[in-house]
Image (tube, helix red, strand yellow):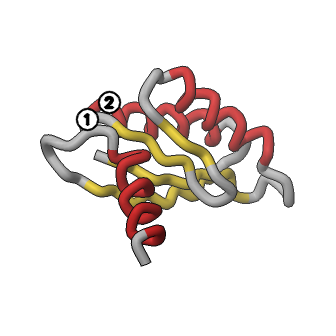
Amino acid sequence: MLVAFSVAPLGAGESVTAAVADAVRIVRESGLPNRTDAMFTTIEGEWDEVMEVVKRATEAVGRHGNRVSLVLKADIRPGRSGELTGKVDRVEAALTDE
């Protein structure tokens, strides 16, 4: 499965860089395939392992304030792997075929 999530403390001021860095650090240390962009971090893996990483990342952000905002989107497709890059590769191939 792929899980794209965004997590940030609420009431922690304008910059949430340190809190987000703590979350991304946990994701990267998990060893699961992942990608971070300006809006979301996406992780690929099995349900339990991905959700455990999201939980730990959310808890890390929670240490920066009293309240946390979590946005999560999942693509659950059993039996598939490599979709973190595979989905993008298929779109890029379709664009070159035009």
Q: Position of residue 79 (x, y in %)?
A: 14, 41
Give the residue at mark 1. 46
Q: In the rendered view, would you say 56 is above or below 19? A: above
Q: In the rendered view, would you say 6 is above or below 53? A: below
Q: In the rendered view, would you say 23 is above or below 87? A: above
Q: Amino acid at mark 2?
A: Glu
Q: Secondary structure at mark 1?
A: loop
Q: Which mark is residue 91?
A: none
Q: Residue furthest left?
A: 79
Please identify the quadrant where the C terminus is shown: bottom left
Camera-nearest residue between 60 and 3:
3
- Left of 22 or right of it: where is 87? left
Q: Residues within 10 Å of mark 2 (few under 14, many from 20)?
A: some
Question: Which residue is pictured at 68% across the width and 33% down the height?
Answer: 22
Do labels 1 and 2 touch, CB within 8 Å?
yes
Report which quarter residue 72 is drawn in.
bottom left
Report which quarter residue 21 is drawn in.
top right
Question: Which residue is pictured at 37% across the width and 32% down the height?
Answer: 52
- Left of 21 or right of it: where is 85? left
Q: Secondary structure at mark 2?
A: helix
Question: Which residue is pictured at 49% across the width and 38% down the height?
Answer: 34
Camera-nearest residue between 65 and 2:
2
Q: Position of residue 87 (x, y in %)?
A: 37, 56
Give the residue at mark 2. 49
Q: Position of residue 31 (x, y in %)?
A: 46, 22
